[in-house]
Amino acid sequence: MDPLPPNLLPVGCASQDIKALAFAQEARVLPPVDDLLSLEAALKAYPVTVAILGPDWPNKERAAAIDLIYRYAASCAVPKESSPEVMNAAIALALSERAERAQSVFFNRLLALLPDPVFYKDRLGRFLAVNQAIARHFGVTDASVLIGRSDFDFFSAEHAQQAFDDEQEIMLTGRSMEAKLERETYEDGSETWCLTWKAPLLDQAGRVIGIYGYSRDVTELKSTEAALATERHLLEALLTGLPDAIFIKDLQGRFLLANQVLASWKGTTPAGLRGRKNVEFDSEELTQMYDQDDHSVITTGMPIINREEMVRTKDGKELWVLTSKLPYRNAEGKIIGLIGIARNISLRKAFDQELYSAQAEIAALRAEVERLKAAGNTG
């Protein structure tokens, strides 16, 4: 798409004088203006404007007019006294300079606004341009002190060399590097983590003259990730280390998490339980009992502690367990499921039964002894 030609604004000269210019055949000529207020209004209405300064503009206001014109990023002033050829060249040059100036201003402001480090480097890895974010990343207050320096001035030799090798590969192949997770190490032993994007930097002739890119600090994210990994490891150790059955269910009674003990009772694996319900593994009678308890905990928020109940495993064994169920709440305190733990007390139950039987036999023997004694005394 071709760029739109600018508007021509006669300032202190007649419109017909402007129309005579060769350049004016490709641009729209605006109504002439004769004072500063009209000039500013025209510039506001038509920001892409070339102001043609004529001889009729008062000299005392000429400087003020030029200053006003150059406040607008895409406006410029050209003397009317120039020949058409000189006028065309001056207008083209003025517009080009204004565009470059505007781009530079906008670019620098954008770099200053970005929270992530942005950088441009030459073929030897020296910084050509940077933003303030990268200065903060390196612990300096003035970004200009980075110009001409390289990663070797800030990072450990190991990391600086790795970054340099990556950049040489980018310049050699022309392929960009996208979202590479980098561990940045420093000479003092500290480290940061970042995601880095880099691409070849080309000049106007298309030659590779360096690289440019930006990095996003993910040190806090990595720390959080490490903390979560530690918590996950602790949870897995708890789930696998305890001899009890442990589980978490959602409001619909679906298993969100379960350990191997419970899974073995159901004849499956912890992963095989996830997302499934009791009815898929247990009898209708047991399912109804489990679901009633679950519903009571979820609706009332009152836990069930050490309820003695029977569990039938997949292979038909009957186990006696002590089951506790507690409401599972989110960060806002809302109940979103339940947490359960069941301890197998079958051995204790059998021992209690044997003990009860033994005690009954002892009691019967004692009674028989007492009866025999009484019979002997009477004989």
Image (tube, grey):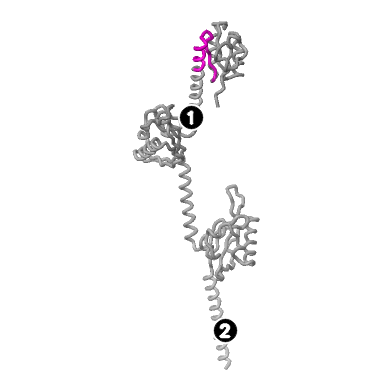
Q: Could you tell me the amino acid type at mark 1?
A: Leu
SS at badge 2: helix
Q: Which residues are magenta?
A: 74-92
Residue on which disc 1 sits: 111
- Give the quadrant of residue 365: bottom right
Residue on which disc 2 sits: 367
Q: Residues within 10 Å of mark 1 (few under 14, many from 20)?
A: some
- Percent x, y of residue 175: 43, 38
- Give the quadrant of residue 18: top right
- Quarter that holds the N terminus: top right
- Percent x, y of residue 55: 55, 6
Q: How many numbered marks appear?
A: 2
Is 109 placed above or below 352 here?
above
* Residue 285 belongs to magenta span: no
Q: Could you tell me the amino acid type at mark 2?
A: Ala
- Quarter that holds the C terminus: bottom right
Q: Residues within 10 Å of mark 2 (few under 14, many from 20)?
A: few
Is 231 placed above or below 87 here?
below
The one nearer the camera, 189 or 178, is 178
Whether residue 20 is visible to the viewer of this picture, yes or no, is: yes
Residue 285 shows which numbered tag?
none
Q: What is the residue that sits farthest to the left in this orientation?
A: 157
- Give the quadrant of residue 320: bottom right
Is 76 placed above or below 349 here?
above
**Label 2 – label 1 distance at C-alpha:** 99 Å
